[in-house]
Image: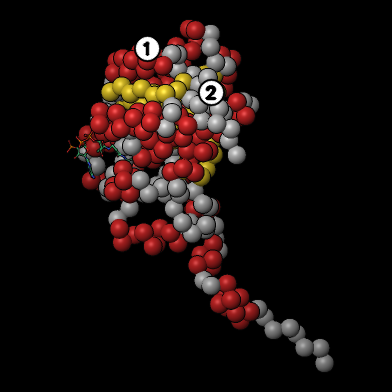
Amino acid sequence: MFQSNLLAGEVVLITGGGTGLGRAMAERMGALGAKVGVVGRREDPLRETVEAIASAGGTAAWARCDVRDPQSVAAATDAIEAALGPVTALVNNAAGNFLACAEDLSANAFDAVVKIVLHGTFHCTSDLGRRWIARGSKGQVLSIVTTYAWTGSAFVLPSACAKAGVLVMTRSLAVEWATYGIRCNAIAPGPFPTEGAFSRLMPADAHDEALRQVPLGRFGEPAELANLASYLLSPMNAWMTGECVTLDGGEVLKAGQEFSRMTDYPRDELRAGLAMLRPPKSSKT
Ligand code: COA
């Protein structure tokens, strides 16, 4: 579907680009002609991602970065720009999360997630935004949020608060920075079986129940998210801003629908049950 030069001319900086969905996006965008800068805390996965992109014929660079620290963000962006040229698109992908009861969270635990997800996204977005505005160049921000960014979610309170903030940041800046030609969009992924997310959020014995929550009957494949992200950053999508695209196999809709659990039954069984509920036709004598 995509031409191999779909993202030619783009220099994409991806936070948390060494692992999981970040790496999937980095490799896909590299294969579609973007120059890709991956930044994160750990050197080894970043280096491996850059090597994978290069061995597939793409161009990439890495820099160590702690998104919680604005100076670290600026230094990493300088390093990526020195290697690849001016960044044209930012993917806010770095995140932190864990399951915990809200009443057990220390102030430090709340900060640990919010500083990565909300503050980190702000630091990266404001750093790149200022550069684009100073240069008079267009730019794009794509932030990875979650389907509970607008509903909230039990047992991931810091993440829910932070992701809601990122979604609102996306919508606010879409309007405020449109005058500079800067567009801001988001993707809300449902369950994708990456090591980082599933090791923290999905106990092995919860897989079957989690699958039942997804109408399309399976978890997402990282390549599917990478394809959507590539389309969103491509010139084919130049008029979208302030939008959040859900990619979850229908999970969030099923959770919110009154009768959606009826889809858990085999359709013939369900039909038989529904027939029993139907009142008998009144007999005309
Ligand atoms: N339940 C409750 N509290 C927890 C916790 C858990 N599972 N994990 C960490 N905390 C608390 C710690 O106890 C600590 O609080 P305290 O000082 O009051 O004891 C605080 O959080 C910070 O912990 P620390 O391990 O020092 O944080 P960190 O900044 O090194 O790590 C995390 C941040 C916790 C978010 C870590 O999981 C991380 O870096 N994750 C990145 C990758 C990731 O989460 N990916 C999944 C995205 S979906």
Which residue type carries mark 1?
Ala
- The percent position of residue 186, horizontal first and vertical second, equals 50, 33
The residue drawn where x is 60% and y is 79% is: 272
The residue drawn where x is 44% and y is 53% is: 219
The residue drawn where x is 29% and y is 55% is: 203
Can see residue 168?
Answer: no
Residue annotated with mark 1: 82
Front one among 122 and 20: 20
| Lower sequence index among marks 2 and 1 | 2
Can see residue 104?
Answer: yes
Above or below — where is 280 with respect to 163?
below
Above or below — where is 47 with respect to 284?
above
The residue drawn where x is 54% and y is 67% is: 262
Above or below — where is 33 with respect to 205?
above
Residue annotated with mark 2: 8
> Dividing the picture into quarters, in which one does residue 268 lie?
bottom right
The residue tagged with tag 1: helix, strand or loop?
A: helix
Tell me which image quadrant ligand 1 sits in: top left
Which residue type carries mark 2?
Ala
Q: Where does the N terminus fall, quadrant-wise? A: top right
The reply to whether the residue tagged 1 has its Cβ within 8 angstroms of ligand 1 is: no
> Dividing the picture into quarters, in which one does residue 259 lie?
bottom right
Q: How is the image coloured?
A: secondary structure
- The percent position of residue 216, horizontal first and vertical second, equals 52, 57
**Horizontal relation, residue 73 to residue 259: left or right:** left
Front one among 202 and 150: 202
Q: Residues within 10 Å of mark 1 (few under 14, many from 20)?
A: few
